[in-house]
Image (cartoon, rainbow, N blue to C red):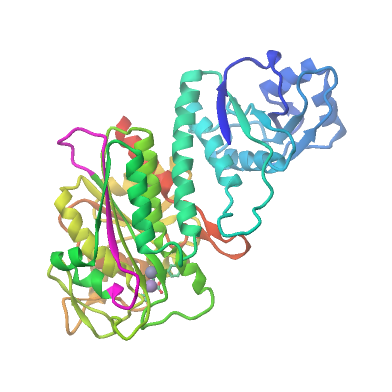
Amino acid sequence: MNYLIETNSIENFKSDLIIVGIYSNQVLSSTANILDNITNGLISSVLKRGDILGELNDTLLLNVIPNSDIERILLVGLGEQKPLTVKNYRKVLTASISAIKKSRFDSATIFLTEIDVAKADLSLKTRQIVEVFEDDIYQFNECKSKPADEMTLKNIVIHSTDSVFGEIGLAQGLAISGGVRIAKHLADLPPNICTPTFLAQQAVALANKFQHCETTILDVADMEKLGMGSLLAVTRGSREPAKLISIEYRGGAANAKPIVFIGKGLTFDAGGISLKPGSGMDEMKYDMCGGSAVLGTLQAAAELNLPLNIVGLIPSTENLPDGQACKPGDVLISMSGKTIEVLNTDAEGRLILCDTLTYAKRFNPEVVIDLATLTGAVLVALGRVPSGLLGNDDALCNDLISAGETASDSVWRLPLWEEYQDQLKSNFADLANIGGKDAGTITAACFLANFAEEFRWAHLDIAGTAWRTGSAKGATGRPVPLLMQYLLNRVHA
Ligand code: BES
Ligand code: MN
Ligand code: ZN
């Protein structure tokens, strides 16, 4: 889709379709009011007939507009006349794009940045339009022999009272939704295509697009030299070679410490010898969503030329059962020197992340944020609404919470108290890799905390938010919007 900012007032408009808001009780938004005057009261007479009440998400397409250069008007309901929440604003946008995406015309002009939205300025509203529309029209067609119907709608004109704020919001919206699209696409790809080697190739291709971006791929031999005994144990049962992908984006001052993102890149998690049950196992192709979100975030940051140094690290492997596979009872020596007793080979995410956390130290990080589809338990605790957040630094966690609120990509913090560490005690090694049935998300993070003692660190458990299940099965691209907001806030701090 093409997007364009337009500041011309509506009186001089020609358009295939104009999207305007109406409140309940027949209250018109300001553009709806002007349109009503231009069309001799068309909108108010439609409202009087009661065909649209103006409740949140109502839509009505008026497709004959007498004596006008405007071909069609889409009325969208905003509910009661008061500032909308960002969540409701996004619902209105979803209703708008859903109502028109199958139409046969090619452009639409949206007059919804004029709507009052609490805690959202013009650029954020503009950005939300692009993000919501792009999210809604995303399709995964790569593996279908007959692609779904092509859309006729090609151009969205976003009306704005200020071109500067409009363009800022547009640029951010395009970058973020581009990052979300990559994250979704890589995650939706089947695991026989999206292997660790494939992910590494994507990282190289991404870095080649940008001047200040560089990728290094560590292979198994490199990881052996580094002593990554924990990460390498996970990969032993797989025939696909593991990769540790490292992307460095240098947009900031030469001496500025980098923000390090670590994304779990399990391209398929069968559980290993502690094999998962069969039903729904296909969804374990999504166990690389942390990794794909890191790629999406780096692309968006590079596209916006953010004046920051950022490192993305993606440990990538499969977790499969095999004669060579790591077994329950095995004791591993991690890169940090700490020994780990594997009690369940399905708790593999922490095994690859711990060595990556140790590796992250060499970048002298400002902060380290890992994102991982780490535990089914986070679904029990929080469902599919926020991502789980845990960390060893209150300021960092608060920054992530507030970024999540702004970006409508929420997180909820869980405690990482020392009492929980007891659950990870092992009779045979420094640590066990599981902490029993209670508080699974917390004990997983406690495990990681043992490898993040030397820097400010936060962990996002995205197992409930990175993809949808059921008939809408597909990746969401979360938490790219959250991480981008965190980065944008750092730039403007
Ligand atoms: N990738 C899974 C986490 C997961 C499970 C995400 C279900 C989404 C849905 C992870 O590797 C895993 O298997 N975790 C285990 C840990 C357990 C063995 C302590 C889990 O959550 O069951
Ligand atoms: Mn697992
Ligand atoms: Zn996993």
Q: Quadrant of the C terminus?
A: top left
Q: Residue at x 48, y 35 (%)?
A: 173
Horizontal and vertical percent for residue 203? 34, 51
Q: In this view, does 180 lie to the left or right of 160?
A: left
Q: Give the range drawn in magenta.
A: 234-258
Q: Which of 304 and 40 is in front in this view?
A: 304
Residue 129 placement: quadrant = top right
Rendered location of residue 317, percent (x, y): 33, 67
- Image position of 322 with respect to 108: above or below: below
Residue in the foreground of this view, choosing between 407 and 11:
11
Where is 360 relative to 233, above or below?
Answer: above
For image coordinates 27% across by 37% down, the residue present is 212
Q: Does the magenta stretch include residue 464?
A: no
Prevailing secondary structure class for the magenta stretch in the rendered image:
loop
* Relative horizontal placement of residue 318, taking residue 407 as reference (left or right): left
Residue at 58% from the left image edge and 40% from the top image edge = 133
Q: From the image, which quarter does the N terminus lie in?
A: top right
